[in-house]
Amino acid sequence: MPSGHVLAHNRDVPAARRTVVAVLVTAALACGVVLWHPSDRFDGVRRLAGLGADRLLPAPTVVERGGEFAFVRTQPGSSEPVGWDPCEPVRFAVNPDGQPKGGAALVDRAIARTSAATGLEFEDVGETDLRPFPGGYVSLGTDERLIVGWGDAAEYPELGGPVAGLGGSATEERSAGRLEYVTGSIVLDVDAFTPAAIAQSPRVMEAIVVHEVAHVVGLAHVAEPMEMMFDSSRGQIDYGPGDLEGLARLGSVPCD
Ligand SMILES: [Zn+2]
């Protein structure tokens, strides 16, 4: 058995597989999504009063850095990315079932780094019993919009082989035909995120979570190994130039 550090390498979602997951989630969402949001009422009042919705955190500065990035989805007929509404918090909940020692801190730090890079506010709504990718989507009637959990290949066949995590989001059509992410899931492989691997290589394991959260907010894989969105972990622990530009663009989409 290789060490935890070796196990961490190349345990990521191959592009084709991740795309399949995203497509499946989106398809399921289209059948069952609830379009009404409790906050819509107040947004409507704000618009009548001539007030746009307000960002919760300042928009990030988009700097062209010459790196590589790609978006999971773009708006129909446009190269503009699909993102989460920056005027709503991304409410996330962690399912602690199977969570390894040290795992909670990895998730917290990865979410904080994503928030800093995107200007999206993430709100921790506590623990949940929901599993990631629960039947394809999260009901919009619940608090949680992003479910983070721990699993294995018996429950998630996509985690077989070298894959260490899965991350993806599902869209909903909002005003003027614009798409927006409204639910997402991350599952982290307990066979890769062992307590030993986390203890020996905390930054590398954290980076895998950062990569999965980046999928959730809308970044796809790139072919450049220096970027976090390269499809395998080669020990990179910091965002590359393309990651930073792509995340800043995703966090700069207009409010719904
Ligand atoms: Zn990936």
Image (cartoon, rainbow, N blue to C red):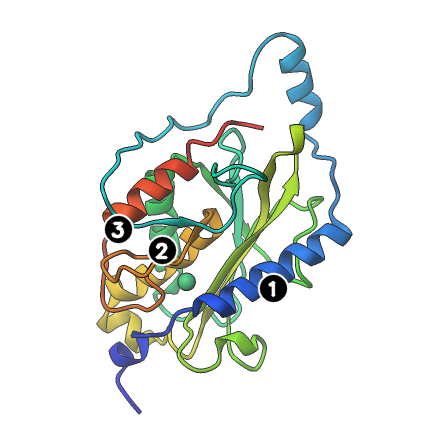
Mark 3, mark 1: which one is toward the viewer?
Answer: 3
> Which residue is the site of mark 3?
239
- Disc 1, SS: loop
What whole-number distance in Å separates the C-alpha atoms at marks 2 and 3? 9 Å
Q: Amino acid at mark 2?
A: Val
The reply to whether residue 130 is visible in this rendering is no
Give the x, y percent position of residue 122. 46, 41
Q: Residue furthest bottom?
A: 1
**Cα gap from disc 2 to disc 1, whole angstroms:** 19 Å
- The disc label shown at residue 131, or none: 1
- Categorize mark 1 by other alpha carbons within 10 Å: few (<14), some (14-19), many (20+): many
At which x and y percent is residue 44?
68, 19
Specify the label residue 210 is tagged with: 2
Q: Residue at coordinates 40% horizontally, 28% vertically from top-left?
A: 57
**Disc with the residue nearer the chain's start (2 vs 1):** 1
* Label 2 element class: helix
Ligand 1 within 8 Å, label 3 CB: no
Question: Taking 169 as reference, is 9 left or right?
Answer: left
Residue 18: x and y in percent read 50, 65
- Three-letter amino acid code at disc 1? Arg
Q: Quadrant of the N terminus?
A: bottom left
Q: Are marks 2 and 3 in contact (CB under 8 Å)?
A: yes
Looking at numbered disc 3 in the image, what kind of residue is underneath it?
Answer: Tyr
